Image: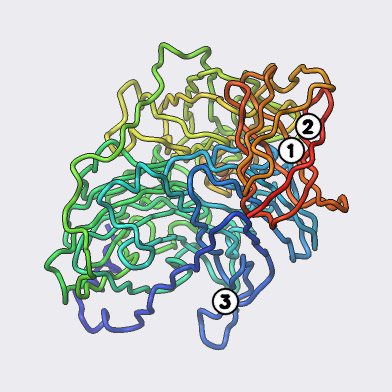
Amino acid sequence: MRKILLLACFLPTLLLKAQNPLSIPDTLSGNSITLTIRDSVRTWYPGFPTNTIGINAAYLGPTLLLNKGDSILFSVQNQLMDSTTLHWHGLHIPPEDDGGPHTPILPLSSWNPAFTVMDAAGTYWYHPHLHMRTAEHVTKGAAGLIIIRDSTEAQLNLPRRYAVDDFPLVIQSRAFDGSRQFIVETAADSVILVNGTLDPLLQVPAQVVRLRLLNGSTDRVYNLGLQNNQVFYQIGSDGGLLNQPVPMSRLRLAPGERAEILVNLSGMQGQQVYLVSYGSELPDGIYGALNPSSMGMGSIPGYSANLLNGSDFNIVLLDVTNSTTNPVTSIPATLVSVTPYSSTSANLTFPVTIAPQVMGPNGMLNGPFELNGSLFDMNVINHTTSLGYTEIWTIQNNTAIAHPFHVHGLQFYIFERNGLPPPANEAGRKDVVLVYAQETVKIIMRFEDFVNDSVPYMYHCHMLTHEEDGMMGQYIVSGPSSAPEYPLAYGPAVYPNPSSGLFTIALPDMVNGQAHFHIQDVLGKPVYKGTIALKGGEGVLHLAGLPEGAYFLTISHPAGSSATKIFITR
Ligand code: C2O
Ligand code: CU
Ligand code: CU
């Protein structure tokens, strides 16, 4: 085992060298959010500026602070000379707003998705998703965090003051070439950036702090722990809080995954503790272990020369300072109530087999990897389900390396790993599951709200090199509510009207499903569009982000559309 880098933890002279204050992304909130993706430059190595792609910044985008129930209108401006997309990873939103490969934003144009936040409080993220460009755009810096808040989380005694006792940590491994430009899709990813900072130091108060961890790396899996083996508590998985804090000393985090942890630093002012990735403890068959192949054969070009592999290395130095006013000083006993779907409610089982396209040790390790015998094809729908269905997906990994399997559009639950229930820290809402070499994982999910017969959702490996090589499939949710039948003469009821921005829409013939709406100002200029989720024929339209005035609201459905004049007054 190589432990060279961990040595730095014990050598105070090395410790003092080159610690940079951790940069903290700005925040954006409200009902109307503008994100501008553009080419930029940032200098990590003096004298060698690195070309980046930033979102409202030179590297990484702002943290979006959203509340469950909010309706948000986005303006995503693509200032690149290349097409891109913007995907809201983990959010339960309609496929046409999901920002997958089917919704490209052309160079110098914009995209205006609008959706209502339906997910539980948690840590989500956004990143480009154009097929064959995802790795490049994300590697160069186009990604950001989404923090969702809700009333359940608000009642818990948890740290939630952004950058005071609640800190975002976007962990990424990167490779720079001789002129310090990013190398995309390489096994030479030997540099760790946290929120874009090299060798970061984060000042944290001497109390319970919350770390929101995102593995935003292309391929690398981390095995996180505190330098002194201090216990920490995982409180959240990909899509929200767990039932109760889970005490842990190691946390494995695969590309795309998030975890929220609490660290109790009470009484530790003046001390410094590294958050470390204990790569030496990763078993074979994981990108990041000494041997990435579970079979002991084959190699990834450049992998063994990368000193991070199989080594323990530092992520961020926590420098404990004085506590704040009103500190959280204890770990709550319980959090929320998360109940996985029951397997007896499943309508069907969908097998997903992962196998190399080319047999042999190198194919088993490097791919390209096929899902159910084929590589990604934009024109092929690989799976169709029905609105309201509950499905068990059986993911069988017949390769020599672990794959972080991700499903768009919803949160699932891990039902079984090789026939056994998942560990407590994986028992909550998930949208990425690391499926180990030769393992079979069953996940259970429900397709609850959005139907679209033409725009699919994706499922794929979140190792971006694998995804770009075609380890991706797409599914459609079909259902009766995609074709609501009601007479055109029978327009929707919209009330109260005027309103300060919250309108109830009632479509009596449409029990559950969705309706699309768009809003024009009185001159006919489009100002807003989106989807309303309908339950029992009713949905709520949040227009608090629009200025006062009169508008035309058009509710669309395949049988036609109806326009209503609405008034927003404050
Ligand atoms: Cu984080 Cu399909 O993506
Ligand atoms: Cu996603
Ligand atoms: Cu993979």
Say which amino acid is labelled 1.
Answer: Phe
What mark, if any, has residue 517 been given in the picture?
A: 1
Residue 144 lies left or right of residue 235; in this view the side is right
Is 145 in front, or is 353? 145
Measure the alpha-carbon separation of dots 3 and 1: 47 Å
- Where is mark 3, residue-wise? 180
Tell whether label 3 touches label 2 (CB within 8 Å): no
Say which amino acid is labelled 3.
Answer: Arg
Residue 321 lies left or right of residue 18; in this view the side is left
Circle 1 SS class: strand
What mark, if any, has residue 499 been given in the picture?
A: none
Is 413 in front, or is 333? 333
User: Ligand 2 lies in which image quarter?
Assistant: top right
Q: Which of the image's four quarters has the C terminus?
A: bottom right
Image vertical order of residue 329 relative to residue 267, above or below: above
Measure the alpha-carbon separation of dots 2 and 1: 6 Å
Measure the alpha-carbon separation of dots 2 and 3: 51 Å
Image vertical order of residue 27 relative to residue 278, above or below: below
Q: Nearer the viewer's eye, disc 2 or disc 3?
A: 2
- Spot occupied by residue 514 in the image (x, y as percentages of width and height): 66, 29
Image vertical order of residue 74 relative to residue 243, above or below: below
Residue 242 lies left or right of residue 133; in this view the side is left
Residue at screen point 50% across, 23% down: 393
Is 47 in front, or is 438? 47
Tell whether label 1 touches label 3 (CB within 8 Å): no
Say which amino acid is labelled 2.
Answer: Ser
- Where is mark 2, residue-wise? 556
Tell whether label 1 touches label 2 (CB within 8 Å): yes
- Spot occupied by residue 108 in the image (x, y as percentages of width and height): 80, 63
- Residue 117, quarter of picture: top right
Identify the image's colour scheme: rainbow, by chain, secondary structure or one colour: rainbow
Residue 568 lies left or right of residue 449; in this view the side is right
